């Protein structure tokens, strides 16, 4: 029972609990807060795997920016408790079994082939000094494209969320 | 020492929860959050494999996934706001005009 | 070296005339149309005469000319080729000669008809097909002509196609003909199977070489009977005669040409041509004779009661055709052809004269409304009288020689044939003189007619309200045919005609010459009997229709329902309608139309369309606009894909 394993189980439990809580809560704000908890737990998992940069980015960007955006939107739109409406039978009848089947299959395959090799804690240190060169040398093109992507997304979001133009004011008589 | 498979199982559980949330939740924003949950699960498996095979490219990929997730979240939420303005509801079952 | 007579010109010239009139006739004047028709038909006649002139100098009989290659399939060869021997020469001259006269007559008769150009086009087309039939050197080309004359007959019977009865009569003729053609075709197939050729020379040389035995007998008998079925259809014998009386719906020149002189004789020609087959199949010959004899009697009895002048002549034609088949059936093929020739003259004349009568009384065809026309239309009366004497068999007119020849040969085979033939001759004489007396004697019972048409402007003064004579263009053919009805039989004196046809039919008949001397007395006795019988018929007709005109009605009442039956043609048409037509039409309606066409074909397409619509209706629900169901499908689908890929991967 190494420390590694204990920490893994701890963070993992938090993540799973947060995920299940996301499903269980009816008010979206509660779901959002659960998601933040999941992300924090995942950041811990990344640290266990030695991905320091990724963990930091996870906390700063994912939990800190994206989730904040979510919370802002929830509060802006004054989202209330979910109503109960007739959902889709297909989703429940086909989707959940399908999803379960898919996950089980994938899990089975992965387990068969990956075996029980252990991953050492901090096996692959992913500090900015190691990730940086990768990012700016081999993955330069995707890096630049994603920057354009973000630009486009910003513009799109601004356009989509802006107020629709109001009706033109008719010219006054005498002008 | 934690076997790789444990990480993958955790990742799978998170992904499954994400899909389930997508299927059973009625609030659009909650559905979006389920999508984010799915992405997180996938990120975890990427990092786990990167550590397993000593390939830093896995972590770089996670970086990109997060960027895309951010962009998508921004645009998606803007759409939600636009839909809310016209339909006054966040219930996904009532946004169903695009049907035959 | 066989000279080339260019036989192909004879059929092709009328075809050219038909084409020209058919394509350009509508816009041309009537003079132009008639000129074209007469020129091309006349040219064919002239060419036939020139062929006849050169006939005696031909080195080889039969003389064959090859025109074009048609079917070469394995060992089966059938080409467009022509065959000339005494038989086809006789037919050729009859068809072109009588045909040409009738063309001239039609110029006058059809002058006022709006379909003038169409008439002459069809008439020339008919000549083409008939000449093809007569000149063919193999059964297949003959069949082309056979079918073609059926087509021309249909077109011409239904010439006034706006009249329902005419259109139906045309259909009836064609359909009944087709039934006969079916038999004909099966016979041809049997010939192909066994010979394997349809050329006359191949078949007729092959038949004697067949080993005698039961198999050959059966084959030839079957072929003979099947060919006879075809002849029954075309030549209106029992049981396929029903179309001929209805065919009187067509214009009178059509009745004269097609249904008296030429088309209906095609069956006789075909049987005579195939005599080699028949001579080795005595059962078939007997069948031919019996059918001919019965038809002769049967049709004659119906002729007694008819009141429409053309219908009397129609039944008379059926009856006379029966005589021709009787002749062929007892082996006297040349006698049959002889009667064919004389019949063309006097029956053609009878029809044309009847047309002249109808023209004179303004379209009336019921004899009861005629009478006393002797003084109004003397030329028509004279020519029609000549023809009546001819058909009754009074010497020295043509009919006497040919009919007597047949009766003599029939007597030599079996006296029953002779007896029925004599009785029929009596009846024939009776109804023909009845026709003559009802039309031309007594008082005129008809309504006053107005002068009509440009042609009658010439007799404008006597045209009003009274029957008037026909114009010269109609009378001249009548006169020519009357002369032929008088002298046409004289070629038979001294068996000259028989000798002429000997190269075709073999010397078997000529060998009778030896027997003749011994039985001369019998022959003269029988001749006397037939003349006596004809005279009796005439006298009876005189008594009933001139001296004591009240008698016929009393006699008819005396016979009661039997008279009714005869008047209604023994209800044969009704019988056929109930036995064949109605079940066919009903079956076709219920099974083929409502069952197959509607239910199977239409419904299957409709159901396919409906099915497609149902399926798409149900699939439509997949696109409900509901996001969650989309997600559900995506999850299920991706699970399936993943499963499949795993299964692929694991399998390896």
Image (spheres, coloured by chain):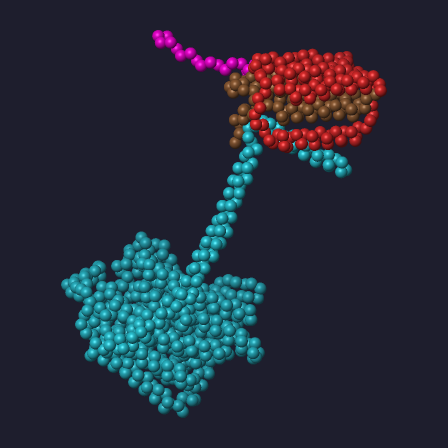
Chain colours: A red, B brown, C cyan
Q: Residue furthest top?
A: A174
Quarter of the rendering occupied by the C terminus of chain C: top right
Could you tell me residue C518's position as x and y percent? 40, 91
Residue, x 54% and y 24% (percent of image)?
B94
Q: Is residue A51 above or below residue C238?
A: above
Could you tell me residue C381's position as x and y percent? 23, 73
Q: What's drawn in magenta, residue-wise?
A: A157-175
Say left or right for C634 vs A168. right
Could you tell me residue C121's position as x and y percent? 35, 59
Could you say which is closer to the camera, residue C565 or residue C429? C565
Residue, x 57% and y 79% (percent of image)?
C213
Q: Residue furthest right?
A: A1
Could you say which is closer to the camera, residue C347 or residue C496? C347
Could you say which is closer to the camera, residue C594 or residue C475? C594
Q: Main secondary structure of the magenta part?
A: loop
Quarter holding residue C448: bottom left
Q: Is residue C607 above or below residue B73?
A: below
Residue C380 seen from this side? yes
Q: Is residue C235 above or below residue A118?
A: below
Residue, x 63% and y 26% (percent of image)?
B23
Could you say which is closer to the camera, residue A75 or residue C96? A75
Residue, x 77% and y 15% (percent of image)?
A47
Say left or right for C65 vs A59. left
Tell whether position C412 is magenta.
Answer: no
Say left or right for C119 vs B19. left
Quarter holding residue C157: bottom left
Could you tell me residue A56's position as x and y percent? 73, 13
Residue C12 seen from this side? no
Q: Is residue B62 above or below residue C532?
A: above
């Amino acid at each position: 029972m190494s420390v590694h394993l204990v920490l893994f189980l701890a963070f993992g439990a938090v993540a799973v609990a947060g995920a299940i809580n996301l499903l269980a809560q009816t008010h979206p704000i509660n779901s959002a807060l659960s998601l933040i908890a999941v992300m924090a737990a995942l950041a811990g998992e990344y640290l266990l795997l030695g991905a320091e940069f990724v963990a930091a980015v996870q906390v700063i960007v994912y939990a800190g920016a994206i989730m904040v955006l979510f919370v802002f939107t929830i509060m802006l739109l004054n989202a209330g408790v979910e109503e109960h409406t007739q959902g889709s039978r297909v989703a429940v009848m086909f989707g959940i079994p399908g999803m379960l089947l898919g996950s089980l299959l994938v899990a089975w395959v992965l387990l068969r082939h990956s075996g029980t090799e252990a991953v050492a804690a901090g096996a692959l240190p992913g500090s900015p000094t190691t990730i940086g060169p990768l990012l700016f040398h081999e993955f330069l093109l995707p890096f630049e494209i994603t920057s354009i992507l973000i630009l486009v997304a910003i513009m799109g979001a601004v356009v989509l969320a802006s107020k629709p133009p109001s009706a033109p004011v008719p010219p006054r008589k005498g002008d | 020492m934690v076997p790789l498979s444990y990480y993958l199982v955790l990742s799978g559980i998170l992904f499954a929860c994400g899909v389930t949330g997508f299927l059973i939740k009625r609030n659009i924003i909650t559905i979006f959050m389920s999508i984010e949950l799915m992405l997180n699960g996938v990120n975890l498996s990427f990092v786990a494999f990167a550590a397993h095979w000593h390939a830093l490219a896995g972590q770089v990929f996670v970086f990109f996934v997060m960027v895309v997730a951010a962009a998508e979240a921004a645009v998606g939420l803007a759409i939600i706001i636009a839909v809310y303005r016209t339909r006054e509801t966040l219930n996904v079952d009532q946004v169903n005009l695009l049907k035959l | 070296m066989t000279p080339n007579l260019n036989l192909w010109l004879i059929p092709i010239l009328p075809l050219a005339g038909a084409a020209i009139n058919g394509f350009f006739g509508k816009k041309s004047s009537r003079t132009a149309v008639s000129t074209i028709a007469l020129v091309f038909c006349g040219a064919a006649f002239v060419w036939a005469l020139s062929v006849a002139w050169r006939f005696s100098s031909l080195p080889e009989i039969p003389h064959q000319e090859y025109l074009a290659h048609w079917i070469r399939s394995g060992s089966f060869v059938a080409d467009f080729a022509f065959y000339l021997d005494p038989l086809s020469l006789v037919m050729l001259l009859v068809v072109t000669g009588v045909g040409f006269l009738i063309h001239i007559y039609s110029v006058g008769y059809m002058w006022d008809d709006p379909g003038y150009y169409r008439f002459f086009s069809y008439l020339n087309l008919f000549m083409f097909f008939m000449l093809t039939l007569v000149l063919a050197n193999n059964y297949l080309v003959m069949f082309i002509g056979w079918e073609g004359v059926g087509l021309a007959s249909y077109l011409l019977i239904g010439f006034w196609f706006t009249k329902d009865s005419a259109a139906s009569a045309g259909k009836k003729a064609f359909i009944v003909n087709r039934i006969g053609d079916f038999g004909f075709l099966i016979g041809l197939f049997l010939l192909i199977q066994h010979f394997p050729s349809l050329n006359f020379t191949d078949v007729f040389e092959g038949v004697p070489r067949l080993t005698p035995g039961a198999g050959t007998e059966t084959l030839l008998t079957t072929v003979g009977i099947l060919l006879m079925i075809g002849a029954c259809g075309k030549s209106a014998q029992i049981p396929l005669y029903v179309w001929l009386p209805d065919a009187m719906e067509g214009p009178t020149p059509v009745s004269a040409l097609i249904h008296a002189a030429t088309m209906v004789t095609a069956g006789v020609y075909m049987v005579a041509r195939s005599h080699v087959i028949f001579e080795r199949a005595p059962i078939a010959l007997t069948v031919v004779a019996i059918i001919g004899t019965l038809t002769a009697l049967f049709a004659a009895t119906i002729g007694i009661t008819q009141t429409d002048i053309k219908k009397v002549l129609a039944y008379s034609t059926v009856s006379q055709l029966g005589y021709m088949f009787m002749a062929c059936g007892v082996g006297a093929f040349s006698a049959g052809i002889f009667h064919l020739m004389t019949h063309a003259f006097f029956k053609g004349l009878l029809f044309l004269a009847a047309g002249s009568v109808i023209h004179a009384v303004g379209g009336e065809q019921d004899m009861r409304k005629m009478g006393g026309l002797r003084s109004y239309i003397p030329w028509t009366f004279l020519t029609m009288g000549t023809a009546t004497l001819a058909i009754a068999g009074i010497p020295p007119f043509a009919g006497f020689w040919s009919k007597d020849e047949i009766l003599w040969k029939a007597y030599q085979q079996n006296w029953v044939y002779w007896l029925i033939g004599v009785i029929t001759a009596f009846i024939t004489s009776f109804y023909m003189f009845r026709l003559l007396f009802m039309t031309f004697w007594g008082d005129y019972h008809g309504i006053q007619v107005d002068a009509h048409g440009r042609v009658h402007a010439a007799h404008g003064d006597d045209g009003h309200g009274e029957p008037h004579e026909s114009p010269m263009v109609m009378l001249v053919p009548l006169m020519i045919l009357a002369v032929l009805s008088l002298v046409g039989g004289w070629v038979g004196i001294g068996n000259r005609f028989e000798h002429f046809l000997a190269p075709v039919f073999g010397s078997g008949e000529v060998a009778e010459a030896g027997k003749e001397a011994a039985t001369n007395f019998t022959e003269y006795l029988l001749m006397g009997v037939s003349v006596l019988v004809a005279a009796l018929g005439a006298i009876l007709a005189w008594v009933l229709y001139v001296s004591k005109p009240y008698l016929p009605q009393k006699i008819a009442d005396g016979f009661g329902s039997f008279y009714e039956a005869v008047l209604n043609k023994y209800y044969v048409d009704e019988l056929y309608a109930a036995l064949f037509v109605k079940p066919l039409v009903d079956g076709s309606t219920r099974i083929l139309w409502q069952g197959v066409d509607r239910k199977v074909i239409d419904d299957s397409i409709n159901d396919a369309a409906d099915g497609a619509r149902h399926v798409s209706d149900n699939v439509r629900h997949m696109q409900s606009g509901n996001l969650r169901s989309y997600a559900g499908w995506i999850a299920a689908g991706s699970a399936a894909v993943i499963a499949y890929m795993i299964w692929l991967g694991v399998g390896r």
